[in-house]
Image (spheres, grey):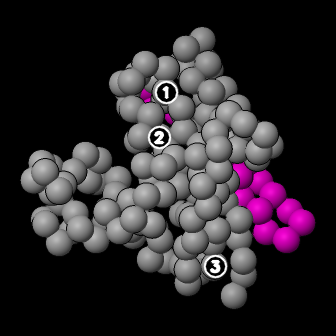
């Protein structure tokens, strides 16, 4: 079983606003960078989307370690929020609808394709070069969209 490292980040100009995501996949001594844009989104949606896209980019079941600066995304799994939300019919502890249900469901599906998914929290906008690179990728997508380079 292959061991893959996935670094992810999402960004948004306005919240909601134009958003971008970036991720880097590492396997052994090789890596590849990816990014994308959404013209109307939120920061949290871009954080989740980066992980979904990264996991779906991997062609076969693997052991994946996800590095993210998004406590929101990581804690949904590490703190078992997802389990509680599902048990309550996608309601929060306050009995309100969970935000971004479709993305959470898509992420669960993407994770299920792999043998294991481990989460590592990194400090955003700090000294982690790969998290910083993912942030650059995400922000460059926002900038390209803002300059109409996609149209």
**Magenta span of residues:** 23-39
Q: Residue at x 72, y 77 (%)?
A: 3
| Residue, disc 3 | 63
- Quarter of the image with the N terminus in it: bottom right
Q: Secondary structure at mark 2?
A: helix
The image shows residue 35 at horizontal and vertical percentages of 63, 41
Q: Is residue 109 above or below residue 20?
A: below
Question: Looking at the rendering, which quadrant does residue 84 occupy?
Answer: bottom left
| Residue, disc 2 | 46
Q: Residue at x 17, y 72 (%)?
A: 87
Q: Residue furthest left?
A: 95
Badge 1 or badge 2: first in the primary sequence: 1
Magenta segment, prevailing SS (helix, strand or loop): strand
Report whether residue 69 is seen.
yes
| Residue, disc 1 | 12
Magenta stretch: includes residue 55: no
The image shows residue 103 at horizontal and vertical percentages of 35, 53
**Circles 1, 2 touching at the beta carbon (< 8 Å):** yes
Label 3 Cα crowd, 10 Å radius (few <14 / some 14-19 / many 20+) = some
Q: Residue furthest top?
A: 147
Q: Is residue 19 above or below residue 44?
A: above
Question: Looking at the rendering, which quadrant does residue 4 occupy?
Answer: bottom right
Q: Secondary structure at mark 3?
A: strand
Badge 3 or badge 1: first in the primary sequence: 1
Badge 2 or badge 3: first in the primary sequence: 2
Q: Secondary structure at mark 1?
A: strand
Mark 3 vs mark 1, CA separation in Å: 29 Å
């Amino acid at each position: 079983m292959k061991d893959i490292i996935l670094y992810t980040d999402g960004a948004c100009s306005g919240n909601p606003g134009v958003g971008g995501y970036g991720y880097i996949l590492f396997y052994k001594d090789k890596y590849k960078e990816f990014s994308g844009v959404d013209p109307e989104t939120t920061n949290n949606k871009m954080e989740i989307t980066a992980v979904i896209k990264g996991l779906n980019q991997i062609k076969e079941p693997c052991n994946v370690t996800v590095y993210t600066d998004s406590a929101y995304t990581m804690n949904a799994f590490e703190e078992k929020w997802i389990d509680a939300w599902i048990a309550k019919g996608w309601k929060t502890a306050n009995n309100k609808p969970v935000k971004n249900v479709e993305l959470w469901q898509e992420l669960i599906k993407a994770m299920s394709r792999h043998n294991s998914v481990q989460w590592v929290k990194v400090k955003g906008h700090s000294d982690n070069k790969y998290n910083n690179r993912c942030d650059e990728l995400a922000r460059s997508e926002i900038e390209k969209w803002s300059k109409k380079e996609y149209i």
